[in-house]
Image (cartoon, rainbow, N blue to C red):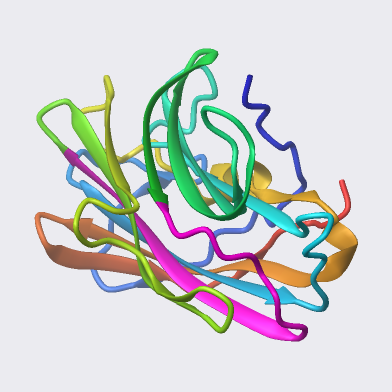
Amino acid sequence: MKRILVLTGATALALTVLAVPALRGGAFATSTINYVEEDWQLVVATTDQTGVGPQITTCMSPTSDASQPFVAFDMNYREYPSFSPGGMQIQVWSGNSVTATSTQGSSQLANNNETLTWTQCLSLNDGQATYGVSNGQSTSFGKFGQGNGLLDVTLSTSATSLASYSPTYSVKNSGVSWESNLVTSMTLVQVRYYSNGVLVSTDSTGYPVTLGQ
């Protein structure tokens, strides 16, 4: 069973508003948001190739409801259908089951003082959510992300909009699951909200993930 990490994240939501969608409880009170992008940054102090560390996971959900399907993105290891060191893997979790995966690479983190950046996005269309990783940059992994069916998945959802998406959910359920002492910082740097291809608002608050829990 995939265990969602329960970590303490920032709870303030300060938005640089380009249009003015209402906010309610940290989520948009509008039915028009159908695409969200998250920019992430991970700073690795040291690596442990023998122990396959550090191991990183982010989570993203169209509903911010742990009882509903969500996506997990593993870095520096792959865990389905069995554990393998290195590489990256996306998994769609529904209840206790994995319903879809997408994998890229098998290299391990190998460089000290390395910064990794990537964007993960979630879109909604006719009862299907699509999740993907793009614009990945890393010394150890090189460029990584979407392309040729790599690092993108679809999942069924009851959501009719991404109004219930929350960056707080993403941050609280993301973290370093193994050898967190090797990581300097992990941050959700920026979130962008779109409606039918139009940028609606940008949240540049910056949400640090609490390490070591």
Relative side of 68 to 123, left or right: right
x%, y% of residue 4?
66, 32
The residue that appears at 20% across and 38% down in the rendered structure is: 31
* On screen, residue 63 above or below 10: above
Q: Residue at x 83, y 76 (%)?
A: 46
- State the residue in front, 18 or 179: 179
Give the magenta part as a residue range: 104-124
Q: Is residue 106 magenta?
A: yes
Q: Quadrant of residue 126?
A: top left
The picture quadrant where one finds residue 114 is bottom right
Is 7 drawn above or below residue 36 in the view shown? above
Residue drawn at (63%, 65%) of the image: 108
User: Residue 80: x and y, percent?
Assistant: 53, 31
Q: Is residue 158 left or right of residue 91?
A: left
User: Picture coordinates of residue 73 (x, y %)?
Assistant: 51, 47
Q: Foreground: 86 or 115?
A: 86
Q: Is residue 54 left or right of residue 100?
A: right
Residue at image location 26% in from the left, 73% down from the top: 18
